[in-house]
Image (cartoon, rainbow, N blue to C red):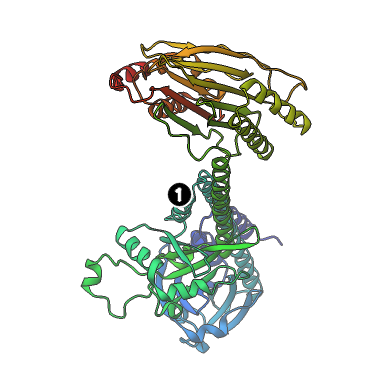
Amino acid sequence: MVDDPWSSALHRLWQAASRAEEVAALADDVYAPLLATPGVHRVVGTRWDGRHVLRYMRALSAGSDTPVIVATTRSMPGAAVREPGGEPVVDRLEVAGLDDVVWPEAAFLREAPGGSVVSCTFRLDQRGWAALALAVDASADLAAVESRLTQAVDVIVACHTGILQRGREARRGADDALLAEASLQMDSSLDVEDTLRRVARIAVPAVADGALVHLARTEGPEFVAATHVAVQQQRALEAAGRDDPWLAALLARRGEDEDTVFLSGAALDGSPFAAPASPTAADADAGEGPHPTVVTISPLRARGRVLGTITFVYQRPEARLPDSAFLRSLATRAALAIDNALLYELRRTAVLSLQEHLLPSQLPVTDRWDLSASYAVGDPMLDVGGDFYDAVLRPDGSIALLIGDVCGRGAEAAALTGLARHTLRTLLEEGTDAGTALSRLNRALRQERASRFLTAVVATLTPRADGTVRLSTCSAGHPPPLVLRGDGTVSEVLSGGLLLGVLDDVSYESREEHLTADDTLVLFTDGLTESREAGGTFFESVLPARLAALRGSDAAHIAESLARQARAFRDSGQDDIALLVARWTGLLPDPGLLPPDHRLEQAALR
């Protein structure tokens, strides 16, 4: 026959279990129906951890609405004989035979009418177990009592499993969110030092209370960053990271095949993380604070090699410590961010070194000419650009200025850049005229079957006896140079010519103008003029006014100022900017040269 009251109670219990956030919340829904079972007078529940420490006891008698609750940390090694294995264990015992060393609930059970006990012990998880004991009299149907007790235990175990599962899912979601945020934060910079600082900060305080980052070096671990939630303890952590021999020796032993290691208790003896044997008031005054309960060390491994280690220190309960899988994932992401930054730094150094070798180490020094140049790398990925310039003193006393731009970036562009600059320089040094030099370069590019074209302009400056200069300009599709006159006017040097490397037989003609004292010639690549602001305006439209505002400035100031202004102006565009500036001074410096008028420059920027 179906027991309708119990069935209804069991149904309500399952419903409560599906909503409960902790097992203790089920107590009323478990105890009351069991006490309503004929012959049951008292229910006593206990909760134990894996070390046979009694954490919790709750007793309720029939006819009472007020339970007796005992929260404790009582160690009872004798209770080990009751600890269940995989399945719940049901026992029938006599109250008189209960041993208080094994049964802390015996005192409550003895107070109930009757003399028998029906008990069920069951495992909640790997770290703890629990028991429900019923005091019954002779009228009780023991089989029915056992059935109801095991059904109630099934609900409790299912509830606890569900709570753990939901907790794991919540933690997994939080961990995934933290890992995603950590990746974004660490990957947002390619600067090595900034990345290392971000790695140290990203997990504090969300994961740990403090963190240390070391890089692996041939001579031993190198401290690079530390952070802690407390400023005073951060200083102590930094000192330990730099100088502590215990930590240095431990980090040096971290092999490539090792996973995260957890250290606590005696394993921290002799370390900078060990608590003092007798804490003093001086420790508190020094800001020592609580000492770590656990220290973890994870290798930073990326692309098959160990880059270093990340050490976390924890001053929190064991239940709030991350697991090794999470720490391994965090360390892997940190290692990739660090490796990317290191590789970027290596690439940046290599590219800048190569770029320097593609440009002249210095410009000629002469009393007649104030020469200067500026080069700004525009590509954030730092591929080698194709801009080049040079200045060549020629046998007849003239000076040839050349500037050019190879289409594209990268290794092929770099190769053509070297070919173009050295070919033009060699020919111009030998006295070859600019048009012939460009034609011979074009022929060399066609013979090499170069897949890229390039532009260039050669400006030959020849002093005259009357103190003026003959300016002969020969261009191969390059932006025309500008002349800043001594009176502040700016004019464009008109010149034409086909791109280099496109057709076989091409000739180039020169056009002539003249310069007077204090006139300045400005050659540049299209990275300057094509810098574009957010509204769509190109720097080309404001260049004449910006140049005019630099009247009276020396060549170095003009070159650096125009490059700086173009970079500040630019909202889009990533081309390199090359400038070559020559100011005619005559045989001796002109004492009448106007000093730089910075007010004009500032006004042009408005």
Task: Give left or right: position of 329 versus 581.
Answer: right
Residue 171 lies in quadrant = bottom right
Which residue is pictured at 46% across the width and 69% down the height?
Answer: 295
Which residue is pictured at 47% across the width and 75% down the height?
Answer: 249
In percent of width and height, residue 464 lies at 46, 17
Residue 427 lies in quadrant = top right
Mark 1 Cα within 10 Å, few/some/many (few <14, many 20+)?
some
Closer-to-camera residue (4/276): 276
Position of 226 relative to 341 (above/below): below
In the rendered image, the quadrant that contains the N terminus is bottom right
In percent of width and height, residue 267 lies at 46, 79
SS at mark 1 in the image: helix
Position of 333 relative to 74 (above/below): above
Which residue is pictured at 50% across the width and 33% down the height?
Answer: 375
Closer-to-camera residue (486/589): 589
Task: Give left or right: position of 521 versus 94.
Answer: left
Closer-to-camera residue (491/437): 437
Task: Give left or right: position of 15 versus 553.
Answer: right
In percent of width and height, residue 217 lies at 52, 66
Instruction: State the residue position of label 1.
Output: 194
